Image (cartoon, rainbow, N blue to C red):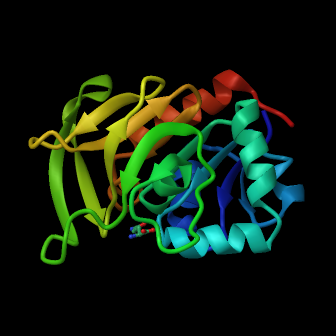
Amino acid sequence: PGPVGVLALQGDYREHAAVLESFGAEVITVRRPEELARVSGLVIPGGESSVMDKLSRMFGLAGPLKQAIAAGLPVYGTCAGLIMLADRMIDGIAGQQSLGGLDIAVRRNAFGRQRESFEVDVHVPELGDPPVHAVFIRAPVVEEVGERASVLAALSDGRVIAVEQGNLLGTSFHPEMTSDFRFHRRFHNRVLEVGFHS
Ligand code: GLN
């Protein structure tokens, strides 16, 4: 496969690049269609989804990103990246669009003011023990999970915070800010398995 891309329009893409490099992957930042065309997988980082949306359209990347997702590019979205991957947004700002791909509806900034940021250990059956230490920063939740998507993790109150659908993986929290990279591993294993090229 080709290099792994990290969408670098905005947000904490450097941290994701460092995680993937620690696996020995070749990592490139993606800001243009020519860069996207080289990658065999893509991480969409956390940040601000409305800004990422605007920049992706301004840079002519939104269309190629949608095409690559539809063609089977493995993509891992965290937080704002999860919002970008959602087919439906419950409270995007006016005119905000997502790329889509995941058959889910997300609610942005779902945890209210005093809980805007928090950390909690979450059991993720697919990853086994130990639980994942999940860091939430003005995080979205997955409010509806359509038939094509499956739940990987939920909080104890049932709110869904990690989903998977084919080559797409999304978490509402930030594993790149911890030292537990099992979600990145899962994504990277998929990248190696699929061997995607445009
Ligand atoms: N609240 C942000 C958004 O709506 C996401 C926050 C994050 O990525 N940490 O895009």
Q: Is residue 166 above or below residue 68?
A: above
Q: Does residue 3 appear in the picture of this structure? A: no
Q: Judge by depth and name the residue closer to the eye, 14 or 116.
A: 116
Residue drawn at point x = 58 percent, y = 71 percent: 95
Q: Where residue 115 sits in the image (x, y, percent)?
A: 15, 70
> Which residue is at 69% across, 40% downward?
69
In depth, the one of 130 and 143 nearer the eye is 143
Residue 110 figure quarter: bottom left
Q: Could you tell me which quadrant the N terminus lies in?
A: top right
111 or 172, nearer to the observer: 111
Q: Is residue 123 above or below residue 48?
A: above
Of residue 22 and residue 74, the one placed in the foreground of this image is 74
Q: Give above or below for 95 relative to 125.
A: below
Q: Residue 189, position in %: x, y?
A: 56, 29
Q: Which residue lies furthest to the front in this view?
A: 94
Quadrant for residue 197, please give it.
top right
Residue that sits furthest to the left in the current view = 157
In-image side of 112 versus 148 (left or right): left
**View quadrant of ligand 1:** bottom left
- The C terminus, quarter of image: top right
Q: Position of residue 78 (x, y in %)?
A: 45, 54
Going by the image, does 159 lie left or right of 69? left
Question: Is residue 195 among the parts visible in the rendering?
Answer: yes
- Say whether residue 135 is left or right of residue 85: left
Task: Give residue 59's position: percent from left, percent from top.
Answer: 80, 71
Task: Give the side of residue 167 with respect to residue 155, left or right.
Answer: right
| Residue at horizontal 66 percent and vertical 61 percent from the top | 7
Q: Which residue corresponds to the image point at 65% horizontal and 57% vertical from the top-left?
A: 6
